[in-house]
Image (cartoon, rainbow, N blue to C red):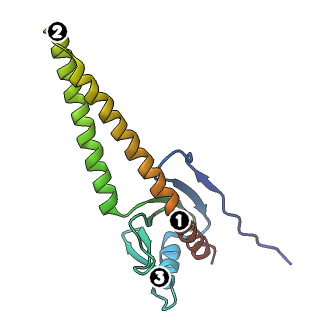
Amino acid sequence: MKDKSNILVEKRNSEVFLRPRFTIDLDKSTGQILENFSKELKKEDCQFLGNIFDGHVFISVSKKEEHFWSPQLHLEILEKTAQKSVLKGLFGPKPQVWTLFMFVHFVTGISFLGFVVMLFAKISLNEPVFFPVIMMVFLSLIWLVLYLLGKIGKDTGKKQMSDLHDFMIKVIGD
């Protein structure tokens, strides 16, 4: 009797990142994996919502379980050979949350650069530099608060991330 074991090796990026990524090599075709996800997501008792589009699978928690920090799992399935594929996954917040965070980061960064320019202009004109320095420190603190909020949000959604990950492993293991 031949024992066929299905071992999945998952390569992950660092835990420092707010949007964890991973890669898994699979011994199944891209079409087979997409079909498995389609079947699972259409089941009546499936606790997740999902969309499949052009080799990409987007999985999120159900509306009744959803909160502001709820994660979304984006999977990209790439064909290596006819019977092998690579699954690339990315956990992240809902697009609306991510857009809000990026907008605030952008405004903070541009403002910081504006105050750097103001600081150098005031230095070259031998004027007081108190205001631009205070604003640069304040904007740095805002950036730190944004980063910490992102970490808190990631930690708040960790259980749901784990559930999404377990669902994905169940589907690709079938």
The numbered dot on residue 9 is none
Which residue in the structure is indicated by mark 1?
Answer: 161
Residue lying at the far left in this picture: please name it. 125
Mark 1 vs mark 3, CA separation in Å? 17 Å
Quadrant into which the N terminus falls: bottom right
| Residue carrying label 2 | 124
Specify few, some or many for label 2: CA neighbours under 10 Å numbering under 14, 14-19, or 20 or more: few
Instruction: Please state which amino acid type lies under the numbered disc 1.
Output: Met
- Left or right, 150 with respect to 21, comes to left
* Res 41 label: 3
User: Front-most of 136 and 166?
Assistant: 136
Q: Secondary structure at mark 3?
A: helix
Q: Separation of disc 1 and disc 2 at Cα?
A: 51 Å
* Type of the residue with mark 3: Leu
Disc 3 to disc 2, C-alpha distance: 63 Å
Label whose residue precedes the other's in the sequence (3 or 2): 3
State the image coordinates of residue 149 (x, y, percent, origin top left).
Answer: 42, 51
Q: Is residue 94 left or right of residue 133?
A: right
Residue most toward the bottom? Answer: 44
Q: Nearer the viewer, residue 20 or 28?
A: 20
Q: Quadrant of the C terminus?
A: bottom right
- Identified by mark 2, the residue type is Ser
